[in-house]
Amino acid sequence: MNLSNIFSTLDSQIPIVALEVLSPEEATIIQWLTTTAQEKLTLPVYFWNLGVSTLEQCLIAVDGGLVFKPVPDYKKPPLADPLIFIFDCINSFDGAGVFILGDVHPFIGKNSPQLSWDILTRVKNLYHRLKPTEKRIIFLGQNIELHESLVRLIPYCEVPLPLVEQIEEHLQSYLQYLLESAQEQEVQFTVSLAAEERETLARAALGLTLEEISDFLRLTVKERLSRNGIVIDATVTPLVVKYKTRLLAQMGIEL
């Protein structure tokens, strides 16, 4: 399964899929899933993870941002197991929807020390019970390895890292956003990048997520702020390489 056909998969009575995404991109992917589910399936989208511990509806604000709205009917008893409760809640949910469950995979993962046979069984039961309904589940997280009993049931796909063209497009739009923000604060902001220099910058950023590139740009703007304003030019390219090297080193990866 590819990311592009995740919703056609869900629409074909396959009720559960797994989507691997790097942590920095989770919010971006949830926003995309919310928008696309509403367009292609005309279904509301809900989000849950152990950290949130409540069920939230995902909404797109007027400005295009992602908004989480708690579902008032979701009331977990104090002593109830949160994972078991959310599965029971989805099973008995009166309505339709796409339920994004974050970081559940360790409890249904291959060789995972947190593997729960109770949860595993409930997932298999849900798979068959949700088929004739309009309720769908997306397991979202990083380093997903499903238990062998689920591999042939639950389609899996990985959100790929952005290509050069996608990075170039993101650079252009995000630098424009930073320019407008600087103008609102009456700060001089100059982008001095020829087409070849922009492409070189994009190639240097390969291996980063779009969110990490945004973080880098914001950090660079903060560090370059002076009385004369901010200048983004070709000297930023070696800085993004340094930034990427540091991030990868934290994960034990060497360039």
Image (cartoon, rainbow, N blue to C red):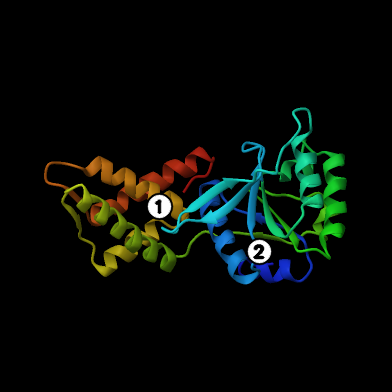
Instruction: Please tell me which residue is depicted at 83% across the width and 63% down the height of the picture.
Output: 131
Q: Are marks 2 and 1 in contact (CB under 8 Å)?
A: no
Residue 234, placed above or below residue 5: above
Quadrant where the N terminus is found in the figure: bottom right
Describe the element under mark 1 as helix, strand or loop: helix
* Residue type beneath disc 2: Leu
Q: In front: 54, or 23? A: 54
Q: Can you give x and y, in whole percent of width and height, for residue 110 in the image?
A: 79, 46
Q: Can you give x and y, in whole percent of width and height, for residue 19 in the image?
A: 66, 56
Compare marks 2 and 1 and give the one earlier in the sequence: 2
Which picture quadrant has residue 70?
A: top right
Q: Nearer the viewer, mark 2 or mark 1?
A: 2
Q: Which residue matches tag 1?
A: 213
Residue 115, placed above or below residue 140: above
Query: Left or right: where does residue 222 sit relative to residue 133?
Result: left
Q: In front: 37, or 170? A: 37
Instruction: Please tell me which residue is depicted at 76% across the width and 39% down the height of the picture.
Output: 83
